[in-house]
Amino acid sequence: MALKMHGTLSAAALGGLLGTSAEAARQQLLKLAGQGLVRATSERKGVGRPEQSWSLTSEAMARFPDTHAALTVQLLDLVRSQLGEAALETVISAREMLTVVTYEQAIPQEASLSQKVAVLAQLRSDEGYMAEWREEDDGTLLLMENHCPICAAATACQGFCRAELDVFRQVLGEGANVERNEHIVAGGRRCSYAIRPVLSDA
């Protein structure tokens, strides 16, 4: 909370705010650093050893109250009530197209299906979906998302979930069959997708 309120601080400055010694504050900072909640940067001020300053990481920032989910749902409701369902679909489609372009730039089209799924899982993890993938004994590739950072929006508007499935089908190409097996919005523990190569008729 002190770092959130005052910004980047040295251990000595933090100790002063907390009414403790610089060493005691440094020990607490090291514990937080081990949890990925703070980071240290060194800055040289004149002669002597560089001074370490501490700041919050993005993971720590995410622990503070955030009303973006409620705001998102409110905006969706306003678009629907003021502009109509068609306008909301236009917004969802535009987001879908942007996502497809972003993913296609990152996923090599000449890669194998499993390689594409691996890259897709990493892209989704970077976006907060805590994604992972594995290959089953029968060759089915499972893409699993253990978290949904847009759950509130997806619950308010199922179009986001439909668009997500369409995005996966587009970026993985015509050679892949993609089906959703589990769905967080429908009460599942996670969202999971079964991805299988499309068999040639030849």
Image (cartoon, rainbow, N blue to C red):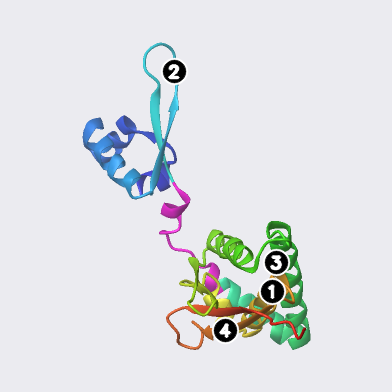
Q: Which residue is more in the foreground, 136 or 100?
A: 136
Q: Which residue is mark 3?
A: 99
Magenta range: 57-70
| Quadrant containing the C terminus in the rendered view | bottom right
Specify which label sits upstream in the sequence, 2 or 4: 2
Neighbor class of circle 4 (other Cα within 10 Å; few <14, some 14-19, many 20+) is some
Q: Three-letter amino acid code at disc 1?
A: Val
CA separation in Å, label 2 and label 4:
57 Å
* Position of residue 50 measured from the top left corner of the image (x, y, whole percent): 40, 21
Contact flag, marks 1 and 2 (Cβ < 8 Å): no
Q: In the picture shown, does residue 13 fall above or below 136?
A: above
Residue 192 falls inside the magenta stretch = no
Contact flag, marks 3 and 1 (Cβ < 8 Å): yes
Q: Which residue is mark 1?
A: 167
Q: What residue is at 59 percent from the left and 67 percent from the top?
A: 114
Tag of residue 45: 2
